[in-house]
Each structure stands twice: as structure tokens, then as C-alpha cells.
């Protein structure tokens, strides 16, 4: 099959695009508003984008039901900091609860029954139960085209200035993904988890 994304003429029950770019790691983003309110939200358009210095990005699209923009982007721009908490199989239900489009005053940590832990270099707290955290300094927002003129489509880029890794997920000094069991987003309502790892050496 072929379809023109500008027309959306795929003829399928649901748009297949998000099922074609998979798996997508989940950036579980902690941020703080200018007024000091903590926000926790998962983003499946998330990834590392550079190594030296280490940089990550997450992208947001759309609006909340009340018509306002997403809190994470506004918070990062206002305060210049955020934390990426790695979402794992054990935390899947809590992560899903924090995807709720809640008013800015709602504490997603309390909503999901999660404990916080102080960060070392930035103000936003970490999800204590997550085995890996990336403390980030906001670098810039890249605005993207939006088909809905009243909806913001943007990429937030941050420099990773601090990394926390639980000793329990290290094996001989290496991060062991079979211990971490990170989850990733597929299309529709589907997810996957990393529970099988294989290696390949590069040619030459």
C-alpha cells in the first residue's frame, strides 16, 4: 500500500505512521514551572541526539483538553532544566497514569503513587524507583510545522549534565538492559520491553 500523509488516505482503521517508526524509547520528563509546581509526563518521541556533549530531545504535539499547551515544554523554557527518568517494565502502570492530561496544579507523582528523589545538579526531582535518570540543562526549542494552527509542535533539546545509574542494573561495570527492562512505545496502544539483547561487531 501507499498513502499520501498530507491527505491521510491510507484507508486503514487507524493511522499507521507511529507503527512504522518503532520502538520509540519513552522519555519520562520531570520539570518545574516558574511558580514551583512539579510536572511528570511521558513522551514517546524521545531519544539521545549527540554524545559529546551528551544531548537528548523530546517532542510534543497538540494541546490539553482545556486548550492550553503542554506543561513540560513551558516549564523547560521557563526554568531551563528537566530530568529524564527511564520508564521500565516495573513502572509501566505508573508511567501510564502520568500520561493523563491533568491541570497544571495536579501532582502526577501523587497521582501515580511515586516517590521523588532530589537531583544533584537541577531542581526538578527524579522518580525514585527509576533505575536511570538524566539531569538536563535546557538548550533550545525547535518549532516544527503544525497542521492545527492553534497547536504547538516542538522539539525540546537538552544537554545531559548529570547521570544517575542504580548499581543494581550494572553487570561488570556495564548497564545491563536485561536488568533495566526499559519499555518503549510502538503504534496504537502497544508497547514493548527490552528483555533480549544481542551483540554484533562492526565490520573492519
Image: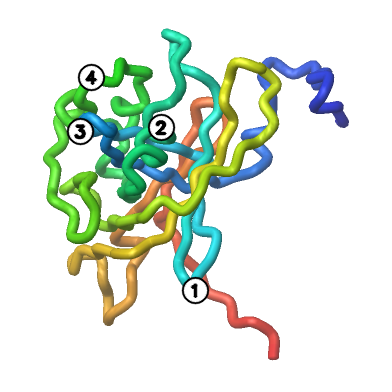
Q: What residue is shown with label 1?
A: 52
Location of the C terminus (image quadrant): bottom right
Q: Is residue 60 left or right of residue 168?
A: right
> How far separated are the C-alphas under marks 1 and 4?
37 Å
Q: Is residue 126 left or right of residue 52?
A: left
Q: Compared with residue 121, is residue 127 higher up or lower down, i.e. above or below?
A: above
Which numbered marker is on residue 189? none
Image coords of residue 63 (percent x, y):
50, 18
Q: Local crowd at mark 4 within 10 Å, few (<14), some, or many (≥20)?
A: few
Tell which circle, 2 or 1, labels the residue nearer the N-terminal end. 1
Image coords of residue 27 (percent x, y):
41, 45
Location of the N terminus (image quadrant): top right
Is residue 44 visible to the viewer in this orientation of the structure?
yes
Tell which circle, 1 or 4, labels the residue nearer the N-terminal end. 1
> How far separated are the C-alphas under marks 2 and 1?
26 Å
Q: Compared with residue 106, is residue 58 higher up or lower down, i.e. above or below?
A: below
Q: What residue is shown with label 2?
A: 74
> How far separated are the C-alphas under marks 4 and 3?
10 Å
Is residue 46 visible to the viewer in this orientation of the structure?
no
Which numbered marker is on residue 105? 4
Amino acid at each position: 500500500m501507499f498513502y499520501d500523509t498530507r491527505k491521510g488516505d491510507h484507508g486503514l482503521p487507524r493511522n499507521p505512521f507511529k507503527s512504522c517508526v518503532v520502538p520509540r524509547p519513552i522519555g519520562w520528563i520531570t520539570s518545574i514551572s516558574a511558580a514551583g509546581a512539579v510536572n511528570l509526563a511521558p513522551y514517546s518521541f524521545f531519544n539521545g541526539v549527540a554524545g559529546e556533549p551528551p544531548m537528548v530531545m523530546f517532542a510534543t504535539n497538540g494541546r490539553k483538553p482545556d486548550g492550553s499547551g503542554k506543561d513540560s515544554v513551558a516549564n523547560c523554557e521557563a526554568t531551563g532544566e528537566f530530568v529524564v527518568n527511564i520508564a521500565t517494565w516495573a513502572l509501566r502502570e505508573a508511567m501510564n497514569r502520568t500520561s493523563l492530561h491533568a491541570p497544571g496544579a495536579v501532582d502526577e507523582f501523587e497521582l501515580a503513587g511515586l516517590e521523588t528523589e532530589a537531583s544533584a545538579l537541577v531542581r526538578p526531582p527524579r522518580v525514585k524507583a527509576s533505575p536511570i535518570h538524566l539531569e538536563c540543562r535546557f538548550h533550545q526549542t525547535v518549532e516544527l510545522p503544525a497542521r492545527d494552527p492553534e497547536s504547538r509542535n516542538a522539539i525540546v533539546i537538552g544537554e545531559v549534565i548529570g547521570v544517575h545509574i542504580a548499581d543494581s542494573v550494572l553487570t561488570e561495570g556495564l548497564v545491563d538492559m536485561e536488568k533495566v527492562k526499559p519499555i518503549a512505545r510502538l503504534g496504537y496502544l502497544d508497547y514493548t520491553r527490552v528483555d533480549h539483547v544481542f551483540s554484533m561487531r562492526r565490520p573492519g
